[in-house]
Image (cartoon, rainbow, N blue to C red):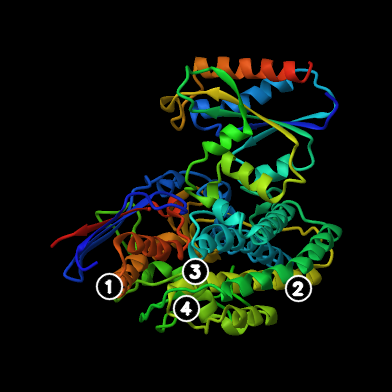
């Protein structure tokens, strides 16, 4: 894979399993990655996500998802599926990933990656409380997601 | 709606959580409560026992949107307690730093929160298809504000360079010149923002409103000046606790703020533009004319126009400061930690932010008092709704509910910071 690629982990490091996307990026950091791949621990970037994506050909976004599936399950989510799941905007001060991506492709399509894949790590609502450490299932999910991404990056 | 109950269980496009519950009987409001259920965070309590130099870092975490204001206010209060005088260069850099936050916060509010309301869209996402250029403009203006914050503060969120007496690192003249070019280019976009506001229809509201802001005859007050109102208040900001009273109310985790006579008051962009119109930059005065609003205005719906005026002012004054700063130079500063108390107020984008601390001789915090701008406004929002709702009872319930939400969003409340805030319920009694 020679295209300019960015791997972005999203989530809050202070809310238990919400951190699994960040943890997956940290696991990838320990691997020897090709020079065309950048890793970003984005936290909760809000609109800043558009700046992080700008100029890349391919983007892999890793985030915790409430899918209803078993905790730790890793899934590949297409942008089209994500758009349909966008919920009502609650706070513009805290735009969520689906809204920011929808806004980005609507307004700045030329700057956005042509390929964008979301790697979702399934978590449970109860594991997202402030101050909690990540659960064993969440950590296993982060490992699994990192492996999946490494495979996609031919590492 | 002659009689009924308006309930908004979760007010959207606000920062933090709150609800509105209004009961109307025979055209009269019999009960109105703005319930701020965002949980309290006890910052004032856990600051006690911390060292003075931790305050700017910790209090910046109260808000991810205006950490700059928390840092500036904490630093000013500490410097007052330790009798630290800052240099003219530091004063100018701090003003530039504060203006960067006005640019990013106002661009976000005008385009992402207010514009969808006034243009009839549920959110900026649904507005973006019809108004792509406007939303792109908002993203550019916000990026500019964020980049200016990062240039001075070291990073966009929870910046790191501000310290007692000055900054730990300074932007180079070259980097300031580079951002000045972008500010110059953004000026017309800010003027276009004022033109857009001029096309929006806002509801009328007659109100004998009290408004409070910092004021300085020499400049558009943000980090200094006296605390004044349109009703005769004129005090040293450090004395705020003697004049602005706070009380607990049972239905909200935000305190209610009132003047000595018990009346509520408004803080924020409209208060500032009303009280300090003379100190606005020349392009900002032009922008005011473009919005079609005649300042001073007693209609909180004109807050969005005041934000557009301040957006223009912030860009123009930022350019002026950069020219004056030229090449910032390292300064040797020192201070003596001493026992005593210090208080300060700065203008955050949403209004006055007050910090007050007392220290022992080791600089350990003995007492802390922090009042966020939204805490100042919550009482005023309730009073305003009591006037606003009876003037719009002819509206169907859903429209009235939306109007109430719009009314509240005009204040750009940040209930996360105010707790110590929204859902709307309107009860009908026939």
Decide which of tag 3 and tag 4 comes sooner along the chain: 4
Q: Are marks 3 and 4 in contact (CB under 8 Å)?
A: no
Q: Disc 4 vs disc 1: which is toward the camera?
A: 1
On screen, residue B102 versus residue B269, left or right, reads: right
Q: Is circle 3 on the same chain as circle 4?
A: yes
Q: Which mark is residue B172?
A: none
Where residue A59 appears, as percent x and y from the top left, is 72, 32
In what element is the residue under mark 3?
loop
Q: Are marks 3 and 2 in contact (CB under 8 Å)?
A: no
Q: Disc 2 vs disc 1: which is toward the camera?
A: 1
In the rendered image of this protein, does residue B332 appear above or below residue A123?
Answer: below
Choose between B242 and A126: the one closer to the eye.
A126
- Residue under numbered circle 3: B268
Q: Are marks 4 and 2 in contact (CB under 8 Å)?
A: no
On screen, residue B310 versus residue B238, left or right, reads: right
Where residue B237 appears, as percent x and y from the top left, is 48, 71
**Residue ID at (66%, 66%):** B95
In the rendered image of this protein, does residue A111 appear above or below residue B73?
Answer: above
């Amino acid at each position: 894979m020679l295209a300019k690629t960015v791997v972005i982990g999203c989530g809050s490091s202070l809310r238990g399993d919400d951190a699994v996307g960040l943890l997956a990026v940290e696991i990838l950091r320990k691997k020897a990655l090709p020079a065309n791949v950048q890793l970003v621990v984005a936290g909760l970037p809000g609109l800043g996500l558009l700046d992080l994506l700008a100029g890349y050909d391919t983007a892999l976004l890793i985030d915790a998802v409430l899918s209803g599936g078993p905790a730790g399950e890793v899934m590949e989510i297409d942008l089209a599926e994500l758009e349909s799941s966008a919920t009502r905007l609650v706070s513009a001060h805290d735009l969520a990933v689906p809204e920011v991506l929808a806004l980005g492709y609507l307004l700045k399509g030329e700057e956005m990656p042509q390929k964008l894949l979301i790697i979702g790590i399934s978590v449970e609502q109860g594991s997202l409380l402030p101050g909690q450490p990540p659960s064993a299932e969440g950590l296993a999910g982060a490992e699994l997601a990192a492996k999946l991404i490494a495979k996609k990056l031919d590492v | 709606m002659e009689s009924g109950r308006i309930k908004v269980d979760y007010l959207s496009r606000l920062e933090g959580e709150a609800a509105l519950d209004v009961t109307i009987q025979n055209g009269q409001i019999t009960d109105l409560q703005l319930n701020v259920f965002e949980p309290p965070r006890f910052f004032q309590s856990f600051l006690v026992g911390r060292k003075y130099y931790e305050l700017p870092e910790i209090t910046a975490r109260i808000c991810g949107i205006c950490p700059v204001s928390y840092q500036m206010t904490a630093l000013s209060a500490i410097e007052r307690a330790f009798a630290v005088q800052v240099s003219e260069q530091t004063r100018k850099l701090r003003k530039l730093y504060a203006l960067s936050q006005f640019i990013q916060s106002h661009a976000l509010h005008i385009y992402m929160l207010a514009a969808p309301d006034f243009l009839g869209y549920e959110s900026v996402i649904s507005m973006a298809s019809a108004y792509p250029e406007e939303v792109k403009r908002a993203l550019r203006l916000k990026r500019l504000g964020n980049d200016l914050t990062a240039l001075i503060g070291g990073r966009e969120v929870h910046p790191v360079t501000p310290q007692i007496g000055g900054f730990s690192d300074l932007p180079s003249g070259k980097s300031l010149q580079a951002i000045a070019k972008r500010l110059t280019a953004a000026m017309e976009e800010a003027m276009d923002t004022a033109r857009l506001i001029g096309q929006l229809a806002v509801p009328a509201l007659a109100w004998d409103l009290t408004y409070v802001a910092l004021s300085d005859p020499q400049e558009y007050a943000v980090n200094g000046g006296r605390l004044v109102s349109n009703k005769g208040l004129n005090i040293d900001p450090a004395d705020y606790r003697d004049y602005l009273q706070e009380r607990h109310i049972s239905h909200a985790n935000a305190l209610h703020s009132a003047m000595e006579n018990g009346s509520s008051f408004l803080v924020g962009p409209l208060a500032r533009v009303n009280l300090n119109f003379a100190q606005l930059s020349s392009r900002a005065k032009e922008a005011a004319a473009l919005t079609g609003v005649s300042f001073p205005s007693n209609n909180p719906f004109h807050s969005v126009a005041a934000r557009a005026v301040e957006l223009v002012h912030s860009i123009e004054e930022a350019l002026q400061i950069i020219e004056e700063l030229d090449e910032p130079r390292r300064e040797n500063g020192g201070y003596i930690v001493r026992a005593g108390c210090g208080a300060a107020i700065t203008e955050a984008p949403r209004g006055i932010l007050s910090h007050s601390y007392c220290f022992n001789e080791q600089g350990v915090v003995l007492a802390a008092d922090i009042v966020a701008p939204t805490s100042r406004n919550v009482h005023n929002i309730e009073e305003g709704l009591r006037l606003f709702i009876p003037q719009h009872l002819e509206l169907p319930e859903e429209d009235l509910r939306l109007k109430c939400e719009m009314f509240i969003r005009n204040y750009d409340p940040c209930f996360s910071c105010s707790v110590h805030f929204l859902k709307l319920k309107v009860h009908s009694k026939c």
